[in-house]
Image (tube, grey):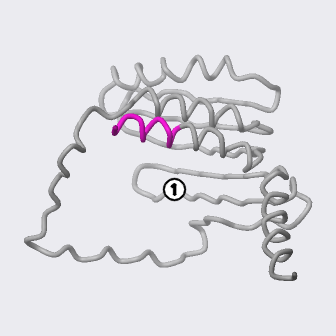
Amino acid sequence: MLWLWLPLALLGSVLLVAAVPVRLAFEAEAHGTGTPPRRRVTLALFDGRVPAITLADSGTGTPRRKPRPTRPGKRRTARKGAGGAFPVAAVLRLLRDLLACVQIERLRVSGVFGLADPVETGLLYGRICPLKYGLPGAATVLDVTPDFSGPRLDGRAEGVLRLRPLALVPPGLRFGWQMLRARA
């Protein structure tokens, strides 16, 4: 009888952990175009009531993996019947649904950016301005200024997002179903 209750208890505990809110905190900092950006991502289970788990930290100096060498002469061929247009609408709906599951507790972005072409810098800044003045909440600060003199990236971003992992399942299933229907 234990063999029946043990998998049910395991499934119940996984569902319980997936239903409890999770806090995802991130920090990123970039100074100049020559230095690599620093970033740190932590995950706190049970809405931050347990110590946070560091998912990524570029300041620890962990060595990067070497890329695998490619074998010459092997090329992948497309499967027959696998062609067709990529369903962009399904991806956009997935992003919209995933963003609806995430609550922004705190978001602070400050910095200066510039691209090689001043026109492109202006276009990018024009796309950022609606976010700058339209993000809801007093805990959201977006202080970004353009630099039209040349390529530049100096700034800092930090934030805390709150989400329930179980709430991400329906958008993922819906996206998978739409991708299956698009291939058929």
- Type of residue at label 1? Pro
Decide if residue 13 is on the left or right side of residue 168. Answer: right
Label 1: how many Cα within 10 Å (few below 14, some 14–19, many 20+): some
Which image quadrant for residue 4? bottom right
Q: Quadrant of the C terminus?
A: top left
Observer-nearest of 141 and 165 = 165
What is the x, y in percent for residue 49?
A: 92, 60
Decide if residue 104 is on the left or right side of residue 154. Answer: right
Decide if residue 107 is on the left or right side of residue 30. Answer: right
Decide if residue 108 is on the left or right side of residue 125. Answer: right
Which image quadrant for residue 68? bottom left
Q: Is 176 within the magenta?
A: yes
What is the x, y in percent for residue 55?
A: 65, 65
* Helix, strand or loop for the magenta stretch, by majority: helix
Q: Assign a secondary structure to mark 1.
A: loop
Residue under the image location 73 percent in, 52 percent down? 24
Observer-nearest of 121 and 7 = 7
Residue under the image location 58 percent in, 43 percent down? 173
Residue under the image location 64 percent in, 29 percent down? 143
Observer-nearest of 54 and 183 = 183
Q: Which residue is mark 1?
A: 37
What is the x, y in percent for residue 92?
A: 49, 29
Segment colored magenta: 175-184
